[in-house]
Amino acid sequence: MVSGMIERLDEVDWSGLTHAYGAADDVPELIRGLLSPDAGQREEIRHELYSCIAHQGTRYPASARAVPFLLALVADPATPDRGDLVDFLEFVATGTGQRYWKRYPIAEERAAGSSPALDAYDAVADAVPLFVTLLGDTDAEVAGPAAQALAVFPEHADRTAPALAAVAADDDSPVALVTTALLALGAIVPIGTPEHDALLRRRARDDDENVRWAASLTVCRLRRPGLLPAATAELRRWAVRLAARDDHSAPWYGLREELALDELAALDPDGHHARLQPILDRMLGETPSSNWHNHLLSILDRAGLLVRADPDRAPVPVEALHPAQRQLVERLCERPDIFAADRVLMPLAWAGLPDTLAGLRQYAGR
């Protein structure tokens, strides 16, 4: 099947299509390169193909035309790196991926009219039956990405939700696949749907904490009243604890606390500030992986301060800050090391705050 599709690559007028860098006449060779016996070369080609047809999330006329050939590769068990290709196809469909497990706004996208992005989305959506089949693949590195990909096609929930629920209910499924299937259900099943209550109740009591987290998050996303008290209690435990920095192998490492906090903020806005304060304190106490400029961007975003690279951004009145934001300002005032050597921190200015230590202390009334 793959060889037949590869031969058909030359039937497309790629020079008449465009991608991020102009004419798309290099796409056939890139797709052929995905079958290279050299793993390093395949990885380089995937990155180059991403840069061409989904550069920074933008889709182009060539994007949708490339999808059927990529799907043919995924459908063939002999193709290397199929899981990576499924991940890539999900990104081609959405331009964002499914990092936060939100319901994909396809209705709004359709209302906006035709576009290369919508064409790419629909081209990948044609593979929903294939992704459902791949849920049963013996290679977990293929089944997991397939479950995640199904999360971005809510229009197909009637077909995909039963398949995802079956995977989530299977005690022989790997933990990572169970958590992915549960999260995908929360992204595609209509809010209020009671059909999966028994599954969610059982998984919310699972021995594995990652499964409990995923089931609880899905309960909250679906707003199932009888299950909400236990689910919100579980998410509170995640929202206030320090992230396990030494457990990089855990499913959804680095996202569990963040997603729990966000969902609780939607369900219980009044208690959000108290839950947010220890998170901001923890982030402020970390050593930046790159520099304070980038680290502050993450902290300010988590604090809910709109960061906009606008030199004329109006200052945020101190009385407009909510309690957790005000505490963050106070903590920053106590950290002269962050402002070492009279450093000016542009993210603060972009968030509407003073960008020097002296200015911030004056702003806080010190």
Image (spheres, helix red, strand yellow):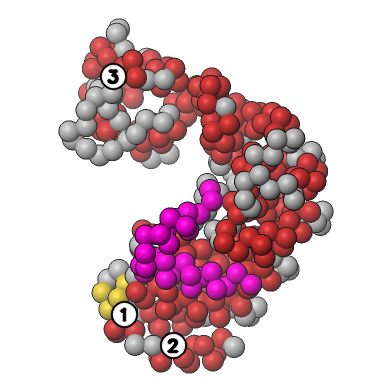
Alpha-carbon span between mark 3 and mark 1:
50 Å
Alpha-carbon span between mark 1 and mark 2:
13 Å
- Is residue 190 part of the magenta span, yes or no? no
Residue at image coords 72%, 62%: 163
Task: Please identify the quarter of the rendering in which residue 172 is found.
Answer: bottom right
Q: Magenta stretch: dominant SS? A: helix
Task: Please identify the quarter of the rendering in which residue 15 is found.
Answer: bottom left
Above or below — where is 239 with respect to 64?
A: above
Which sits earlier in the primary sequence, circle 1 or circle 2?
2
- Residues rendered magenta in the picture: 102-129
Residue at image coords 46%, 83%: 32
Task: Please identify the quarter of the rendering in which residue 207 is found.
Answer: top right
Give the residue pinned by disc 1.
Answer: 17
Q: Residue furthest left?
A: 312
How many C-alpha atoms fall within 10 Å of the one at disc 3: few (<14), some, or many (≥20)? few
Above or below — where is 305 with respect to 78?
A: above
**Which element type, helix, strand or loop, lies under badge 2?**
helix
Q: Circles 1 and 2: CB distance less than 8 Å?
A: no
The reply to whether residue 314 is in sight is yes
How many C-alpha atoms fall within 10 Å of the one at disc 1: few (<14), some, or many (≥20)? some
Residue at image coords 58%, 31%: 267
Give the residue pinned by disc 2.
Answer: 9
